[in-house]
Image (cartoon, helix red, strand yellow):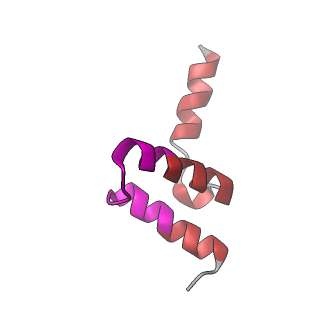
Amino acid sequence: MADSAADKTSKNKKINRLTLAEIEARLEEIKKAEGRWQSRYARALLARKKALTGSN
């Protein structure tokens, strides 16, 4: 039961608190599930990744 609670909290972590590795992992999950990055969540992750890497 404690494992599912830990999974739930990590799944609901705010985007601005995710590390670059966590963002890339979630983007891969979305790519496999949806096949593209058109959802609002995916676009927010991409924007955060861009901010973290300093890309223009």
* 43 inside magenta stretch: yes
Which quadrant is home to the N terminus?
Answer: top right
Q: Which residues are magenta?
A: 29-46
Residue 56: quadrant of the picture: bottom right
> Is residue 49 positioned above or below 8 on the image?
below
Q: Position of residue 52 (x, y in %)?
A: 64, 71
Q: Nearer the viewer, residue 34 or 10?
A: 34
* 36 inside magenta stretch: yes
Q: Position of residue 2 (x, y in %)?
A: 63, 18
Residue displayed at 56% across by 73% down: 50
Residue displayed at 58% across by 55% down: 23
Residue displayed at 50% across by 53% down: 27
Residue 32: quadrant of the picture: top left
Q: Is residue 40 toward the left or the right of residue 30 in the image?
A: left
- Residue most extreme to the bottom: 56
Residue displayed at 59% across by 38% down: 10
- Residue most extreme to the top: 1
How many numbered circles are shown?
0
> Is residue 56 positioned above or below 53 on the image?
below
Q: Is residue 2 toward the left or the right of residue 56 in the image?
A: right
